[in-house]
């Protein structure tokens, strides 16, 4: 028998997925899996109600022309259908995780109100062991948090594949927290967290069914998302749900079980040691190669800082000074203005910034300094294939004022020679080359 899938207010483009709105007629329990994005649900009551003096939205079912009673009836209807989907049909409910949003209080004066939000239609789930209890969604806090710092957990869940496929495009708007600080791992599978450890994706077992909370993703086509999501749902339907192991289970062992557990522990220890070594060497590699960013980077964070690191490796002391950088060394001092662009030729912007700073230094009585203009034009091309990277007027200005004009590729060649020879005499010669060149620097590799 063919499985049936329903997307509710969630744009999933797939031949096997039907699409409807939350208040349309199809019953959730008639499907094997239902995908719901409740982000737009609140507009059905926010459009017709205004916040009171305390910021809360309220409606009186005796006076609101049926709004309150209709919402209450629909929430109850969807709650029953979802409960049947999970418990009786052993189906899957995939839910986009958002904050609860605007809450509507439905009730007449003097009577306790019923509160309606994005998640009021979810069924009550209570998971209990000897020490803890997970009560969903009443004890759940859908805390508003925004970020893209998603870390996918190694959970073994089929939905892990969905999250890893789009890990770089996850843009969560809420995190899930338990009001009683119940350890979520005791009852559910945490699929992803942010950097501070908050759960942003969660899989909760409901009898034989599954309730899955997933964060929003950005920049993915509805058809691609549907393909990966359906693959995860089908894989989930073919495997048993997560069940917490009771604390008395270790007393019941099978022959050979302890040996396998010890072997796994040893492998995990070796894996952790290897992972630590990989991180250590990766950090060294990143530090070693960060200067190469100046060959293709742009802006102060990427291009200018990488170039500053290269100048430090040549032996200059480098510090930021407003729009320029200040170099100091035994051979002399300099001010450097930098600019990178996709354009083939860099214009007068960096030159003018340097000239302005040089004038200021002179008027304030500072010691004479060299001026250097560092450019990186056509930065998307192979540096060896780049044409002239500066405009003629930049060359004329630098030559006239005795500024050195150098490209990022020439600085890279100087850095390469400094690291290969490592002799203080060689580094000193490279520093003098920059400080003594007027106009375009041409012999960076033969200093």
Image (cartoon, grey):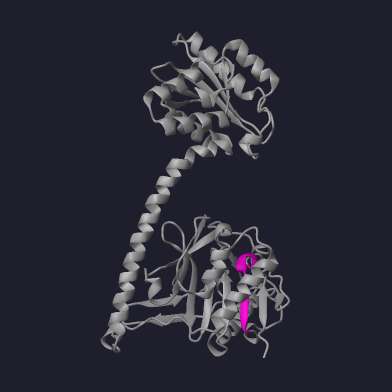
Residue 34 painted magenta = yes
Q: Which residue appears at 54% of the width and 16% of the height?
A: 437
Vertical order, 437 against 284 (above or below): above
Vertical order, 428 against 236 (above or below): above
Residue 311: x percent and y percent? 46, 28
Residue 280 painted magenta = no
- The residue closer to the viewer here, 42 or 302, is 302
Vertical order, 217 against 186 (above or below): above
Q: State whether residue 156 appears in this view.
A: yes
Residue found at the far right of this picture: 15
- The residue closer to the viewer here, 109 or 313, is 313
User: Which segment is the magenta one?
Assistant: 32-41
Q: Quadrant of the N terminus?
A: bottom right
Q: Quadrant of residue 106?
A: bottom right
Q: Quadrant of residue 139?
A: bottom left
Q: Left of 304 or right of it: where is 69?
A: right
Q: How many marks?
A: 0
Q: Which residue appears at 31% of the width and 78% of the height?
A: 261
Q: State whether residue 106 appears in this view.
A: no
Residue 303: x percent and y percent? 55, 35
Q: Which residue appears at 49% of the width and 74% of the height?
A: 157
Vertical order, 284 against 216 (above or below): above
Residue 251: x percent and y percent? 26, 86
Residue found at the far left of this picture: 251
Q: Quadrant of residue 120?
A: bottom right
Residue 275: x percent and y percent? 38, 59
- The residue closer to the viewer here, 195 or 100, is 195
Q: Which residue appears at 71% of the width and 70% of the height?
A: 13
Q: Left of 259 or right of it: where is 233?
A: right
């Amino acid at each position: 028998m063919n499985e049936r899938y329903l997307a509710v207010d969630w744009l999933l483009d797939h031949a096997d997925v039907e699409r409807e709105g939350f208040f349309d007629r199809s019953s959730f329990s008639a499907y094997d899996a239902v995908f719901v994005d409740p982000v737009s649900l609140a507009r059905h009551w926010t459009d017709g109600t205004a916040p009171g003096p305390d910021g809360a939205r309220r409606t009186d079912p005796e006076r609101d022309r049926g709004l309150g009673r209709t919402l209450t009836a629909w929430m109850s209807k969807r709650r029953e259908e979802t409960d049947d989907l999970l418990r009786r049909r052993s189906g899957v409910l995939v839910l986009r995780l958002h904050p609860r949003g605007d809450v509507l209080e439905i009730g007449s004066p003097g009577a306790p109100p019923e509160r309606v939000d994005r998640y009021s239609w979810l069924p009550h789930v209570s998971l209990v062991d000897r020490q803890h209890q997970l009560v969903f969604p009443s004890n759940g806090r859908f805390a508003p948090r925004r970020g893209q710092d998603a870390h996918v957990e190694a959970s073994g869940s089929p939905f892990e594949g969905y999250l890893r496929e789009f890990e770089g495009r996850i843009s969560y708007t809420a995190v899930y927290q338990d009001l009683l600080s119940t350890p979520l791992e005791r009852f559910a599978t945490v699929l992803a967290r942010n950097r501070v450890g908050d759960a942003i994706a969660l899989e909760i077992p409901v009898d034989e069914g599954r309730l899955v909370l997933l964060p929003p993703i950005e920049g993915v086509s509805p058809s691609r998302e549907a393909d990966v999501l359906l693959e995860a749902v089908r894989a989930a339907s073919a495997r048993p749900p997560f069940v917490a192991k009771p604390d008395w289970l270790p007393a019941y062992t099978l022959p050979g079980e302890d040996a396998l557990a010890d072997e796994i522990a040893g492998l995990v220890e070796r894996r952790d040691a290897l992972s630590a070594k990989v991180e250590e060497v990766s950090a060294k590699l990143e530090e070693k190669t960060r200067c190469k960013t100046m060959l293709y980077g742009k802006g102060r964070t990427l291009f200018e800082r990488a170039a500053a690191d290269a100048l430090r490796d040549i032996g200059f002391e480098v510090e930021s000074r407003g729009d320029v950088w200040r170099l100091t060394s035994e051979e002399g001092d300099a001010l450097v203005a930098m600019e990178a662009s996709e354009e083939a030729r860099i214009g007068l912007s960096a030159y003018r910034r340097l000239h302005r700073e040089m004038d200021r230094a002179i008027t304030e009585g500072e010691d004479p300094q060299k001026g250097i203009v560092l450019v990186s034009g056509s930065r998307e091309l192979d540096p060896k294939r780049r044409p002239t990277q500066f405009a003629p007027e930049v060359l004329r200005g630098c030559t006239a004022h005795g500024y050195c004009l150098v490209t990022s590729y020439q600085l890279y060649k100087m850095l390469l020679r400094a690291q290969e020879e490592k002799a203080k005499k060689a580094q000193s010669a490279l520093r003098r080359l920059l400080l003594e060149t007027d106009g375009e620097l041409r012999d960076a590799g033969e200093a």
